[in-house]
Image (spheres, rainbow, N blue to C red):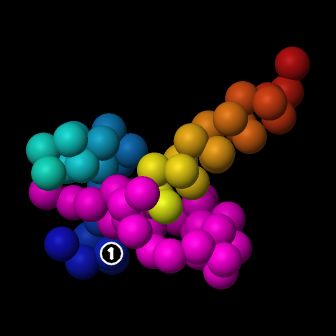
Amino acid sequence: MKTEELQNKSYEELVQLQQDGKITLVEFVEAQSELTDEWKEWIDTRPISDESARAFLAWHEEYAMNHQEQ
């Protein structure tokens, strides 16, 4: 699937596509426009790979949890 097509999908649809093996973790991350800037910074110093995408998602989740408005 093209990135443009994926960007029109909901988060839940993207999760399902990734779980079904129809898209990679890299495609999953890149399809989420709200992650674009942080992802670009992340891959400046890391390879673009599923392992890197997995680490990025873990970092982003932890960052979001630590910076929630209370």
**Mark 1 burial class by Cα count in 10 Å: few <14, some 14-19, many 20+:** few
> Which secondary structure type mostly characterizes the magenta part of the structure?
helix
Where is residue 60 shown, x and y percent of the image? Answer: 64, 46
* Residue pointed to by mark 1: 3
Where is residue 35 shown, x and y percent of the image? Answer: 59, 60
Residue 16 forms part of the magenta stretch: no
Compared across the picture, whether 38 is left or right of 32 comes to: right
Identify the residue shown where x is 62% and y is 38%: 61
Please say whether residue 7 is visible from this viewpoint. no
Q: Secondary structure at mark 1?
A: helix
Compared across the picture, whether 47 is left or right of 37 comes to: left
Identify the residue shown where x is 85% and y is 27%: 69
- What's the residue type where badge 1 is placed? Thr
Q: How many marks?
A: 1
Where is residue 13 shown, x and y percent of the image? Answer: 26, 45
Identify the residue shown where x is 68% and y is 35%: 62
Tell me the magenta residue range.
Answer: 22-51
**Residue situated furthest right in the rendering:** 70
**Residue situated furthest top in the rendering:** 70
Q: Compared to 68, does 21 lie above or below?
A: below
Q: Compared to 2, does 35 lie above or below?
A: above
Where is residue 41 shown, x and y percent of the image? Answer: 69, 73
Identify the residue shown where x is 66% and y is 77%: 45
